[in-house]
Image (cartoon, coloured by chain):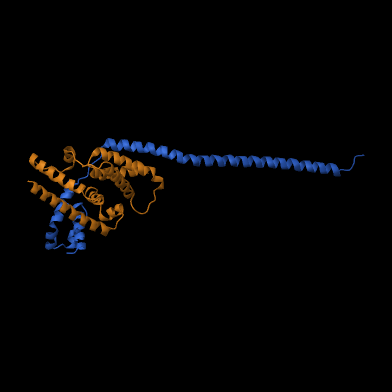
Chain colours: A orange, B blue
Amino acid sequence: MFGLLYERYVGNIYNYIYYRTSNHHDAEDLTARTFYRALKHFSRYVDRGAPFSAYLYRIAHNLVANWHRDHSRRQIISLDELVTRMPRREGPIALAEEHEEQDWLLDAVRRLPPERQQLLILKFVEQMSNVEIGQVMGRTEGAIKSLYHRTLVALRKELVSEENGREDAI
Amino acid sequence: MNKRRMAEVLAAHAEGLTGGAQVMQRLSVTAEERNRLSPLLQLAEHLQQSMQPVQPSAAFVRSLGRELVDNARHQISPAKRPRRTVVIGAAVLGSLVSIASVVGAIVFVVSRSRVRAQARTLHAPAAG
């Protein structure tokens, strides 16, 4: 039973942790710890109507929070990692520009509060519906929609102020 | 446009981006609304392009799967142990009870036949 759940969700949990930590090594380590912890408490798991993935995401979320507390450091994405996950355009200049733009956007996402990062990862990486996100985050569908709105507004403010800062520096 | 309407339109747009139903059309978003929300809609599109799923390595998935199976086996063994002890204990107790009842029955039969024999001896007419 646990084996099936592992196969079903290992990719999702890895993705979630990868976007929160931005490196493969820590993503593997924390994914393993998430499943070990879930297995340890599996016999005591009570089905309250939410999918099992909600339980796994909660464990992963807590482990990532601890990881950030322990490693309060600036996250850096390697160029290799960016190349593997981005759509390709023709030409090295376009590619470099795309890297820079994407790096800038993902850096801004990483400066958002954890729950807003979680929302964006579940929505865009895991491609969950608002109802599913609500089940994972323990909120209603309406609350998720409002949080998404506030998250986009905050992210845009962050990007605009950073862009203004860059222009001032030039 | 109030905040609730904005949240609805943005949520519908995001669902459309991630392959969900085209809720935007059903919401009948006006050109003015679209213009007003344009920076946020564009930002959502950038996020969708930048946040692509990644895959864990197959070797990692296999090895973690194996480790979890081994770990689960070790976890199950101690849990099964008390149950096994209870079953064996009950079996031993059951055997003891049945042995005791057989012994009891034998003792009862023997003592009863002795009593009968004694009674027969007492009540028997004296010979000669």
**Frontmost residue, B121 versus B78:** B78
Q: So how many labels did they put on this image?
A: 0
In the picture provided, is B109 more to the left or to the right than A20? right
Image quarter for residue A148? bottom left
Q: Residue at x 25, y 49 (%)?
A: A114
Can you see residue B40? yes
Q: Residue at x 20, y 62 (%)?
A: B3
Q: Residue at x 14, y 53 (%)?
A: B42
Can you see residue B21? no
Q: For the view shown, which residue lies furthest in the bottom direction?
A: B1
Image quarter for residue A140? bottom left
**Frontmost residue, B127 versus A141:** A141
The spot of residue B17 in percent (x, y) is: 18, 52
Q: For the view shown, which residue lies furthest in the front direction?
A: A169
The spot of residue A116 in percent (x, y) is: 24, 52
Q: Is residue B11 above or below residue B56?
A: below
Q: Is residue B102 above or below residue B45?
A: above
The spot of residue B68 in percent (x, y) is: 36, 38
Q: Is residue B3 above or below residue A15?
A: below
In the picture provided, is B93 more to the left or to the right than B12? right
**Quadrant in which the N terminus of chain A appears:** top left
In the picture provided, is A2 more to the left or to the right than B25? right
The spot of residue A146 in percent (x, y) is: 23, 58
In the picture provided, is A21 more to the left or to the right than B128? left
Q: For the view shown, which residue lies furthest in the left direction?
A: A170
